[in-house]
Image (spheres, helix red, strand yellow):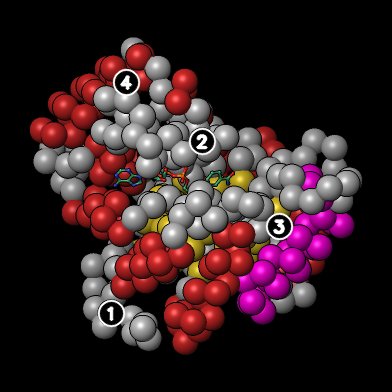
């Protein structure tokens, strides 16, 4: 059926400024890493994208190798883009990335100019787009001069393939260097995409400060630790879950007894706050004003709805903060 976006789509979402740039992003954005390939029904993918936009999620995040198989998320998204979102292109921020392995041989991964520009062209073709809003270097490549990687991002922007540039998973020192190179070139390197969740707090140790100093926004990936920060794995591994479906990135053995005990304790704090654990994990990230957005990877409309409802949460009390810190310290 023809899609007409909800009239009230901008009424409840919160938008945060991406660093000191002109770009605003929704506090909750949608990532297409795992649930938009061949393992999930196209009808669900379409319903999730429609629902996201109807609730003010203006940002969809992709990468060249999201699927499975590689490239499939961009292809599937491109089809839905053409049928449902063509008229809304100017209301959307679409991002993609290159950095991890994508095609065979020396030019299919890393941070070279050759790989980044060729991959960007492939991504645009798969999605049927003239440009993306943000193009990322997906990871730091120690074997390529950083000047070359950032100059490739600069070229991608200047040639009209992207409006803004980003970096993902660069550490604090690498981020400072990238920002300095971008500043010299005049490249709008406006966003950093690191992993951040209750179980992985590495960015608190310098990166958040660095991004603030450099005027860069932060969008966090795997805010629910791929689903571990929900109640779904408390009593085993459900068949229809990321860990149950054989994802390489989330093995059932990663969810051990120590993790389950911490999740169960956090779940109690969430209940006392009248939130689900997933919602509390998102609220907890968004407590930090220097974080622009969290990227959720919802696999169904009810999950997405419930994730967005995290924005209705009350601020954390001191007592709740203490309880959470004591669980995370164990
Ligand atoms: P999450 O930590 O949000 O994990 C997503 C999973 O959590 C879903 O697949 C679903 O599990 C579960 N989930 C989500 N909401 C709920 C809910 N309300 N109740 C129960 N379970 C829920 O994020 P991802 O790891 O998927 O990462 C998000 C995005 O970040 C990616 O799509 C991608 O865009 C980006 N990313 C970037 C990376 C980078 O290197 N830059 C690396 C990884 C991700 P289930 O499938 O079991 O239903």
Q: Nearer the viewer, residue 93 or 154?
A: 93
Label ID, residue 29: none
Q: Which residue is mark 4?
A: 260
Left or right of 71 on screen, residue 228:
left
Q: Which residues are magenta?
A: 108-134
Q: Is residue 104 above or below residue 244?
A: below
Residue 210 image position (x, y, % from top left): 56, 41
User: Residue at left 81%, top 63%?
Assistant: 118
Q: Quadrant of the C terminus?
A: top left
Q: Earlier in the sequence, mark 2 or mark 1?
A: 1
Measuring 26% from the left and 83% from the top, which residue is drawn there? Answer: 7
User: Residue at horizontal 50%, vertical 28%?
Assistant: 251
In this rendering, the label closer to the viewer, 1 or 4: 4
Query: Label 4 to label 2, Cα distance in Å?
Result: 19 Å
Mark number displayed over residue 246: 2
Name the residue nearer the viewer: 65 or 236.
236
The answer to whether residue 197 is visible is no
Q: Nearer the viewer, mark 2 or mark 1?
A: 2
Label 4: few (<14), some (14–19) or many (≥20) C-alpha neighbours in 10 Å: some
């Amino acid at each position: 059926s023809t899609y007409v976006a909800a009239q009230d789509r901008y009424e409840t979402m919160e938008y945060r400024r991406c660093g000191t740039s002109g770009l605003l992003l929704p506090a909750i954005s949608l990532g297409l890493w795992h649930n938009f390939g061949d393992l999930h029904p196209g009808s669900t993918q379409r319903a999730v994208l429609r629902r996201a936009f109807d609730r003010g999620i203006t940002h969809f995040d992709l990468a060249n190798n999201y699927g499975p198989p590689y490239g499939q998320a961009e292809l599937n998204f491109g089809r839905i883009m053409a049928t449902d979102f063509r008229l809304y292109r100017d209301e959307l921020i679409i991002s993609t990335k290159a950095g991890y392995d994508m095609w065979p041989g020396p030019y299919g991964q890393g941070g070279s100019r050759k790989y980044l520009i060729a991959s960007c062209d492939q991504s645009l073709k798969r999605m049927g787009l003239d440009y993306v809003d943000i193009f990322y270097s997906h990871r730091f490549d120690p074997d390529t001069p950083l000047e070359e990687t950032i100059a490739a991002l600069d070229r991608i922007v200047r040639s009209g393939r992207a409006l803004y540039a980003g970096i993902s998973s660069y550490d604090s020192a690498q981020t400072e260097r990238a920002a300095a190179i971008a500043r010299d070139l005049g490249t709008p390197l406006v966003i950093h995409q690191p992993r951040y969740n209750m179980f992985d707090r590495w960015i608190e140790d310098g990166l958040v400060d660095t991004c603030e100093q450099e005027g860069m926004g932060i969008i966090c990936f795997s805010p629910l630790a791929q689903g571990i920060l929900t109640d779904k794995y408390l009593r085993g591994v459900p068949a229809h879950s990321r860990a149950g479906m054989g994802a390489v990135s989330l093995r059932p053995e990663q969810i051990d007894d120590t993790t389950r005990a911490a999740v169960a304790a956090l779940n109690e704090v969430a209940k006392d706050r009248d939130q689900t654990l997933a919602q509390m994990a998102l609220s907890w990230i968004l407590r930090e004003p220097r974080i622009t957005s969290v990227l959720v990877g919802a696999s169904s409309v009810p999950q997405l709805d419930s994730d967005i409802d995290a924005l209705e949460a009350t601020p954390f009390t001191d007592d709740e903060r203490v309880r959470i810190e004591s669980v995370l310290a164990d």
